Image: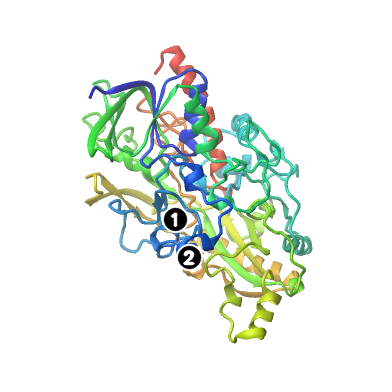
Amino acid sequence: MADSTYDVVVVGAGAGGGTMARVLAGKGIKVALLEAGPMIDPQKDFKTHKWPHDYGHRAAEPSGKAYFGTGTAFGFFTTVSGGWQLEGEPYTSAPGTSFDWFRSRVVGGRTNHYGRMSFRFSEIDLKPYSRDGIGWDWPISYEDIAPWYDRAEEYIGVTGTVEGIPSAPDGKFHEPPRPKVHELLMREAGKKLGVPFIANRRAVITRSINGRQACHYCGQCGRGCLTESNYSASQVDIFPAMKTGNVTLFTEAMVREVEVDANGLARGVVYIDKNARTEKRVLGRAVVLSASSCETARLMLNSRSKAFPDGIANGSGLVGRYLMDTVGFSLRGTLPALENLPRYDTDGFGGAHLYAPWWLWDGHDKLDFPRGYHIEMGGGFSMPGPGGFGREARAAGYGKELKRMVREQYGCGIGLSGRGEMIPNNQSYMDLDPDVVDRWGIPVPRFHFSFSDYEWKQARHMERTFRDLIEAAGGKVLGIGNLAREREGIAVPGSIIHEVGTVRMGSSPQSSVLNEYCQAHEVRNLFVADGSTFVSNPDKNPTLTINALSWRTAEYLAEELRKGNV
């Protein structure tokens, strides 16, 4: 079979790749979009409005899918083809390292089921070195990325309210849903302690746009959204892009390497057709890697040639370096004020309606750690999954007394989770395992990871703050949340699934891999559009920034193609 040739080859069909494909296709550019997993069929694969009793074992999923080792449980719907451990696709960790790596092998990737928390990075986040002398500044400012945040929010739809908080820039918002009762209690407790709880900013539409229906508050966001009210790259980016006729989707395509020509420019990619079990090529004028932080770095390190013996565009030796994940810590409590509360629908849009942005952004001289964190919360009467009654299900007794206690206490629980910034360090990175390959013969990632005292002290601040909040609300602390995920008082690296870094942008080829447009310094027709481009890992969830940066890069790439520069 002859090699297929396109204008642009995009590897990875998640938030970055989906945005890239849609924007380029809209400009008439012919795109090959490669995904290592299968196509997704929302009507078949999503479990919206399904009941646990519709499935065997009350929808308790196999350990590798929903819950593996120290990893996070995603519950009823994770992904058609993914999980913490994938058959035939291992990864390794260096001695003394713990790292959990969740992969979502399916069109749309993790956006089919992620939390959809959508926060803009602020100028404080983008210029951290200028503020405290730690880490590095990004090569772009907030003014550079703000117009792309506008476009991303207006297109995908994000709820929120205008607050004027410097650490949490305001955006183009849909009307948010009203707070739930437990959230109102926590907001009042926050006022006593100076912690501001505001409307959550989530990629869920509350008014109809682009043919998508407004959220009807069924609370099933983690199971996939049949009404397309939640943002997912599959439904919102890729399916519309394919309708233009300018996108050719290759599924079950495991990309092995980026090929270069005699001039050291990218000429396309080599991939394994997983169904045919044959090696194939797709050629293009430009290549965009959007496979996720660790997969993109793995692909670049595996793309060795005479021009790039240490991996494509890796003359700096920085591909794979400065891997970061979010600092996580959780605390559980109970609120007696909610006992015997009349039952009401607390589903909402499938997650917290309020959150607390970092409130001490201008007071770090009084703290023993740099940067900050935001607070997420959980609670209410949502329909329990397997084991979802928690402490009530573990109570002693039987009969009327047990039922009375469950009815009294169900819905009284409160959970607070911190999501904080990790400072990049040279002990946290990924390289290729010299001995282990996957089923396709491709060397696999090997993780090296270490949190520092900065992150430890930040987690201790979370613990004190959460305890104070629960007690200020009249509640009682029960213990660290999700014990299987917490190790020595901080979430296991990787388990928050916000891994970023490894192919960072910057101004100098000596200290970065990419320029400010996510274009490789050493290979002008190679671009990256995922979280690997991040210079730091602010306390904000990364997806919205991936959307915005990918859109910005797509516009730049389209113009460079028009000019004949790539």
Residue 426 seen from this side? no
- In the image, 213: left or right of 564? right
Residue 188: x and y, percent? Answer: 78, 62
Asked where in the image residue 465 lies, by quadrant, the reply is bottom right
Toward the front, the furthest residue is 54
Residue 437: x and y, percent? Answer: 24, 49
Residue 71 vs residue 346, the one in the foreground: 346
- In the image, 29: left or right of 522? right
* Secondary structure at numbered mark 2: helix
- Residue at figure coordinates x 35%, y 49% from the top left: 430
Residue 413 vs residue 218, the one in the foreground: 218
Asked where in the image residue 192 lies, by quadrant, the reply is bottom right
* Vertical relation: 56 (above or below) 201: below
Q: Earlier in the sequence, mark 1 or mark 2?
A: 2
Task: For marks 1 and 2, give the CA distance.
Answer: 10 Å
- Residue picked out by circle 1: 494
How many residues crowd mark 2 within 10 Å: few (<14), some (14–19), many (20+)?
Answer: many
Q: How is the image coloured?
A: rainbow
Toward the top, the furthest residue is 563
For the C terminus, the image quarter is top left
Q: Which mark is residue 485?
A: 2
Amino acid type of the residue that numbered disc 1 sits on in the rendered structure: Gly
Amino acid type of the residue that numbered disc 2 sits on in the rendered structure: Arg
Residue 273 seen from this side? yes
* Vertical relation: 255 (above or below) 554: below
Residue 510: x and y, percent? Answer: 38, 35
* Secondary structure at numbered mark 1: loop
For the N terminus, the image quarter is top left
